[in-house]
Image: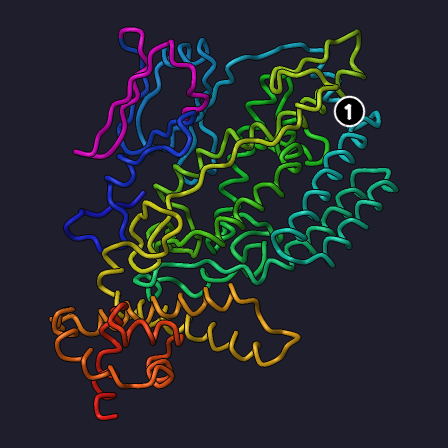
Amino acid sequence: MRAQDNSAASSSAITLDEVFARTPSDPGVLVADGYGLSVSVTAGHLVISDGIGEHRRVRRLPRSERTVRRIVVLGKSGSITLDAFRWCNDVGSAVVAVDPEMATLLTYNAPTTHEDARLRRAQALAPFDGTGVAVAKTLLDTKLTAQADVARRHLDRADIAEVIDRHREALRNADNIAALLQVEANAAALYFGVWTGVTATFVTSDRAKVPDEWLTFDHRTSALANHGSPRSATNPVNALLNYCYRLAEIEATLACHTLGLDPALGVLHVDKAYRASLALDVIETVRPAVDAYVLDLIASHTFRRADFHQTRDGRCRVLAPLTHTLAETMPTWAQLLAPHIEAVAHAFAANAAGALSRRTPLTGKPRSSPRRTKAPATAARPAPRCTRCGGDLGDRRRAICRGCFEGERLDVARDREFQARRRLDDLLMLSTNPATKPDGNTMRSAKASWTRCANDLWTLENPDDERSEADYRSTLLPRIVGVPIQVIAERLGVAQDAAWRIREGRLLPHKRHWAEIAAMQSM
């Protein structure tokens, strides 16, 4: 994690206050970061101390507080006591400690576990008795269905969605894991092939500092990894995908232990040292949901250069506080994973020796309940940022902060007036054809919008104009008493009714019209 002193940092740099004083998007997830952090128990409270230097914070949780579901430790150094593990297990909170690069899961604890050797033996035998193929088909069918939906809804590629749907049909004819993986690889190549237009947006003040390869998604694989692997991302889009996939994998690992499964014994992913193959199998079902989240984030959020770091070998890493916000999405992935991993456990249990109960501790619902697949809560998102300087915005409806708006107010007003005038001109052109003539309300709205923008622009361009209404009535109004209403309407660009009220003194025209009114005095 990098941070700079507030006085020396640029407007788009990330300060330590932003990291350690931010309000979590999801209060159910607490992130501990920094150096020398500690998680311990004092006077019955769980005490979490983290931060850097003077930017330290201490959070105390009583046992009666049961809203915290995850404590995610991302720091480089520190300690977690055995009492803290026991405290979290008692209240149902999971502790997850990972290295800052998310490459290694250092330690974790699942709040509840279920141990039954018969279930794990059935899991180990699944790849050899046909259960593994059936489970893999179900997982991949769910994945391809969701991928087609993402291609259709988020990438606007209905044609690719139809092709992916046809690959689902091929899954039914596959009778072994190798054939299933080939179908999945073919669908993935099509799916990520249409991501090439995905572009990350950075704040204006940082664009000169951003590497060119960070701006556009090129392909899912990384040139820094072997055998076409997506690991070692070289751009922000892939870095965000990898980070969120890893969070989902951690949730799947915790869920496996809760159900009494071994996260390392998979059916799709082959056995490999230090790999949670079953967790990777199950997260195939939620990868498209992660993809949709990242696509929405890329489309709606303005990033800062300090959100990412490029290592000396070209890898792109996600930095705090963005890592904290992403960690707060874990409950969403857990809720999406729950029914699928329970279904996998039930499939293994069906072939176990003896009658095993089909437990549902993750969903808490009977297997037949439609509420098992209810829509999860919205995943946490970073606070909106100013597209100019990168400062946080209080309102997602705004594009730039108040400071930048004041500094660029005149340019913004000119752009608004230009856009309003262009829209009005387009409607006037359409009105010449009876077949395309817009309705009266549309025309009135466009004219009113342009009038407001033109008035605001004139006011900003003439800040020193001190003429008052009294000056207008004493100097200009008497000079247009004899001017025809039609002339006033044409010269000022107003309706004849407004022109009549201006001539009668019942309507005060905006100051931008006063020069034109003064020019009418000779008529």
Q: Percent position (x, y) of residue 272? A: 63, 34
At 58% across and 46% down in the image, what residue appears?
A: 291
Q: Which residue is label 1 attached to? A: 126
Q: Is residue 9 left or right of residue 388?
A: left
Which of 518 and 190 lies nearest the eye of the viewer? Answer: 518
Q: Is residue 383 above or below residue 42?
A: below
Label 1 SS: helix
The image quadrant of residue 475 is bottom left
User: Is residue 470 part of the magenta span, yes or no?
Assistant: no
User: Is residue 54 part of the magenta span, yes or no?
Assistant: yes
Which of 490 and 185 lies nearest the eye of the viewer? Answer: 490
* Mark count: 1
Q: Percent position (x, y) of residue 6? A: 18, 47
Q: Is residue 443 above or below residue 39?
A: below
Q: Is residue 282 above or below residue 432?
A: above
At 58% across and 54% down in the image, what residue appears?
A: 221
Q: Percent position (x, y) of residue 87? A: 40, 10
Q: Is residue 118 left or right of residue 51?
A: right
Locate the C terminus by quadrant. bottom left
Q: Is residue 160 left or right of residue 419?
A: right
Locate the N terminus by quadrant. top left
Q: Amino acid at mark 1?
A: Ala
Which of 491 and 292 lies nearest the eye of the viewer? Answer: 491
The image quadrant of residue 340 is top right
Q: Is residue 428 above or below residue 58?
A: below
At 18% across and 47% down in the image, what residue appears?
A: 5
Q: Percent position (x, y) of residue 58? A: 25, 23
Q: Which residues are magenta?
A: 43-71
